[in-house]
Amino acid sequence: MSSSPRVIDPSAVLLRRALSDFEVPLTRYAVSILGDIERSRDAVQDTFIKLYEQEPKAIEDKLKAWLFTVCRNRCYDILKKEKRMMRLEDDEIQALPSLTDDPAQLMAREEDRTKLNSYLRKLLSLIEELPARQREVMRLKFQADLSYKEIGEALEITISNVGFIVHSAFKKLREVMNQVEG
């Protein structure tokens, strides 16, 4: 029996750590950009493939910002490629036959889903009305949970600029919410 030492692949170690720590936040972030879980999972998978191809020592100190930058870029690449393609609208998707046999259960779930979708649409529409830079910073801060420093690294702007953008975005959202409620 051979007792040779096992070789540890640093890229695999970094990938496992990144998957454990960032798969869910990256997916949420990608969904906020793409609006679709399957395309978001593809973008996140592509992000982790790119991570594995990198030299671990070059990015492990800025891993979180690097991952969100690559994921954001991949999402925008997907949007550009799909711009020519037509997607099914929500109404068309809901018109598809259900595999659930219990109509009462289906109706209860549909009512809950309708309320949740209404709230989410309202929130997302308010965020989408923000200027592009504010929208991007808000996604990274509150959906991806990045620090100001990590956002600055991801977007190549200063930390103070990130703080100013967040403040401006909150001010704008507050104004819009007051108009909607008033």
Image (cartoon, rainbow, N blue to C red):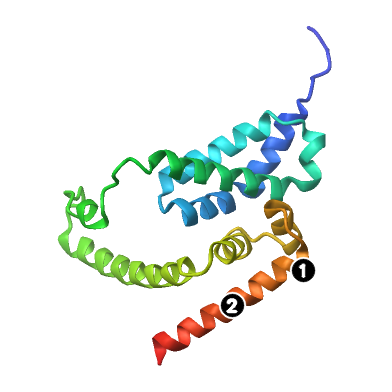
The image shows residue 106, relative to residue 85, as above or below, that is below
Q: In which quadrant will I find the N terminus?
A: top right
List x then y, in percent, for residue 103: 16, 60
- Measure the C-alpha gap from mark 1 to mark 2: 15 Å
According to the picture, the residue beneath numbered tag 2 turns out to be: 170
The image shows residue 166, relative to residue 4, as above or below, that is below
Give whichever of discs 1 and 2 has the lower sequence position. Answer: 1
The image shows residue 123, relative to residue 94, as above or below, that is below
> Quarter of the image holding residue 109?
bottom left
The image shows residue 135, relative to residue 76, as above or below, that is below
Residue occupying the point 43% across, 43% down: 39
Within 10 Å of disc 2 (Cα), the crowding (few <14, some 14-19, many 20+) is some
Give the residue at the far bottom of this rendering.
182
User: Helix, strand, or loop for circle 1?
Assistant: helix
Q: Are marks 1 and 2 in contact (CB under 8 Å)?
A: no
Residue toward you, 132 or 42:
132
According to the picture, the residue beneath numbered tag 1 turns out to be: 160
List x then y, in percent, for residue 75: 51, 45
